[in-house]
Amino acid sequence: MPRDAKATRDRILATAAKLFGGVGIKSVGVDEVAKRAGVTKRTLYYHFRSKDDLIAAYLRERDQPTLDYIVGWMDATQGGLAEQVRAVFDNVARLGRNPKWRGCGFLRTAAELAALPGHPAVKAASAHKKKVEAEFERRIAAAGLSDPAARARQIMLLFDGAFSSMQVHHDASYAEAAGTAAVALVRKS
């Protein structure tokens, strides 16, 4: 892909991310994405075969940067696994206190597409969540705790539950409460 074609694709994705993140995927049409990106609909469809393809690309673009934030929060934390897990939930709470925060884009998109489990964006959301779970599992195993897979799954339930509760109640203290429960999971022997 020529350099300017990549820049155009990136601009379309950045525009879609802003719009999808702001009001949701079903509320935004490709006409609006194209208009705000400063491209024709034909150009948009040159880069993305369909709106479904664009939605999936939007999540795939968010995957590694979001994972990097989570890993970065843990790596930047002094102390052991309990402190690292606490840092993740504390940072989620911090984000949730921002009035512009709209929740987890992966969960929001998967919820909007709940009736379409085979949708490429739902698969992208699932793949991302599995990577986060695997990171928790890796760290739990490295700490020598028993049953790292089960503990990581339980932490993911708390993690995603915190996002959901924060979204419903507009209250970041749900992330802090989930963090307390998650820390208890990694302090057990």
Image (spheres, grey):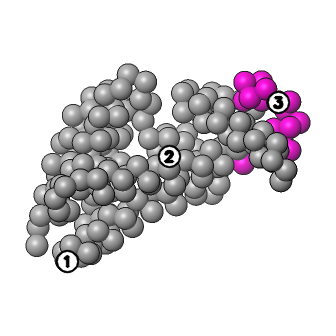
Q: Secondary structure at mark 2?
A: helix
Residue 116 visible at all:
no
Q: Amino acid at mark 1?
A: Gly
Q: Main secondary structure of the magenta part?
A: helix
Tag 1 near tag 3, CB within 8 Å: no
Q: Nearer the viewer, residue 162 or 140?
A: 140
Task: Tell me if residue 44 is in the magenta stretch.
Answer: yes
Instruction: Give the residue number, with chain letter if any, for mark 3.
Output: 39
**Real-space Cα distance between discs 1 and 2?**
30 Å
Give the side of residue 137 with respect to residue 69, left or right.
left
Characterize the local packing of mark 3: few (<14), some (14-19) or many (20 or more) Cα atoms within 10 angstroms.
some
Residue 42 visible at all:
yes
Which residue range is magenta in the image? 32-53
Characterize the local packing of mark 2: few (<14), some (14-19) or many (20 or more) Cα atoms within 10 angstroms.
many
Give the side of residue 115 with respect to residue 34, left or right.
left
Instruction: Give the residue number, with chain letter if any, for mark 2.
Output: 106
Q: Position of residue 98 (x, y in %)?
A: 36, 26
The quadrant in which residue 157 appears is bottom left
Which residue is located at x 20 percent, y 62 percent? 81
Which residue is located at x 46 percent, y 49 percent? 66
Q: Amino acid at mark 3?
A: Val
The quadrant in which residue 154 appears is bottom left
Q: Earlier in the sequence, mark 2 or mark 3?
A: 3
**Real-space Cα distance between discs 2 and 3?**
26 Å
**Is 188 located above or below residue 95 in the figure?**
below
**Is 175 located above or below residue 84 in the figure?**
above
Which part of the image, by quadrant, shows the C terminus?
bottom left
Q: Residue furthest right?
A: 42
Give the side of residue 68 with respect to residue 19, left or right.
left
